Image: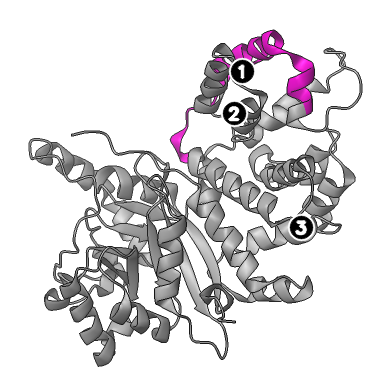
Amino acid sequence: MVQSVLSSLTLGYRPLWNRNRRLAGIQLYLHEEAGAEADVQHLLRILQEIWGTQSPPVLLSPQSRQVLCNLLERAPKGSPWIEVRGDWLQDSGIYELVRQAHARGLMLVWRGPLADVPDAQAAHWFASSLLYLPPEGAAGVLNQSVLALQQAAESAAEAAPSKLPQPLRISPKPALAQLQLLGGQMYEGLHSLALADLCLDRYQAGAIAGWPVADALYAQRHHPALPGRDTVLALMRAVDAEQSLEVFEDILGEDPILAYRFLLYTNSAALGLRGNVDSLRRGLVMLGYGTLQRWLTDQLPHACTEPSLEPVRGAMRLRAGLAERLIEAGVSHELQREVYLLGLFSQLDLLLGEPLATALRRIPLSERVFDAAVTRTGPYAAALQLAIALESEDPAPVRQLREDHELDTEDVNRILLRMLSELQVEKAPAA
């Protein structure tokens, strides 16, 4: 039997966020397993088969020179974007393969420090770049932000920039303290929300890889944790349209704070519902359309409109959706939704600013959920831990969890790819 390429790789992912702070694409890490040679053409066929027209664009991020060389040699035109590390470009063999891949029409992305971009000869081979700012360079960029805002007025009269990441353009290399951001590129490793905002809003960054979660939450530390306004409105519209309970549950489960508040409300003594409401579906069934709409109307005036929190909530949704799919095959839909809530609530402590155990004890979730979220024990712990590990560029935790829980490499990879393919990105507005 021919071995699938998904048995030869350990995958991981990182979301890319656009100027609207919504999902723009996915960076897919490719780690080759020891002693295996991954068939990259087979991988590309799998991606082509399962990726839909609304699925997020993919940036393939090979973590070994061999996988990169195979992609550069064998990927046909129209393949996903391929990352090329800047230090690997110093290899004369890779340098030539990059030149040939560009000539064949592959979309390549240079990845490395902003202060070390490639020379002008090589720069035009790359459709975009994924740039990293060292801390000292980031401080210098922020110090120049006032000047950047002044320059924005001068550029306002110029033609609007493209909505797509722009080709890498080279300027003389400055000192770290004098770094200038490059317009239209992608950026990673940003720990400052101000810097992320500057990249997206002033320099029209194509995307931000990852998100400065700690800084975004710190900026909101004096505000109560509130549900996102867009989710509240979406659920109100669904109720008005008398859509199905499945639709209500899906929308409600998009926002961890809204879902948490809903369970608090349905279990409140004032409401007087019988028994414990331990799931969104049960709460929706017992509440009824009218009461649900009135509750949503109460949530709306104070709902959150802060855009920097959308990537925080979005990453929590990704973890929940992946954990739900990673639970042992054959379990009931009800238990799968329980695991979804586990993933969604696993970072409530960050949003609420209190211990996770304290927050979860206020709602009657099963002990399986509590144990997995708080102590990382019980039957759901493996699914949550693996979902967390797959968010990283480091393959070691994924491999260890597969070994500890006797999970098949191909099955884990296929579940991850299926989940990612079912995500949707916003359509760019018409010009």
* Residue type at tag 1: Gln
Question: Residue 346: in sight, yes or no?
Answer: yes
- What label sits on residue 227 in the rendered view? 2
Q: How many labels does the image show?
A: 3
Can you tell which of label 3 and label 1 is closer to the viewer? Answer: 3
Q: Can you say whether 326 is above or below 99 in the image? A: above
Q: Do the residues labelled 2 and 3 touch (CB within 8 Å)?
A: no
From the viewer's perspective, is the residue at label 2 or at label 3 nearer? 3
Residue 73, position as x, y percentages in the image: 29, 82
**Can residue 391 be seen at all in this image of the molecule?**
no
Residue 297 lies in the magenta stretch: yes
At mark 1, the secondary structure is helix
Q: What element carries label 3?
A: loop
**SS at mark 2 in the image:** loop
Main SS, magenta region, reads helix
Magenta stretch, residue numbers:
282-308
- Front position in the image: 279 or 412: 412
**First of labels 1, 2 by sequence position:** 2
Residue with the mark numbered 1: 299
Mark 2: give few (<14), some (14-19) or many (20+) Cα within 10 Å. many
Look at the picture and state if 351 lies above or below 83. above
Q: Given contact means CB atoms under 8 Å apart, are the residues at marks 1 and 2 in contact?
A: yes
Residue type (three-letter) at the residue carrying disc 2: Pro
The circle on residue 289 is: none
Picture quadrant of residue 386: bottom right
Q: Residues within 10 Å of mark 1 (few under 14, many from 20)?
A: some
| Marks 3,1: beta carbons within 8 A | no
Q: In this view, does 22 lie to the left or right of 224?
A: left
Residue on which disc 3 sits: 328
In space, the residues marked 1 and 2 are separated at their CA atoms by 8 Å
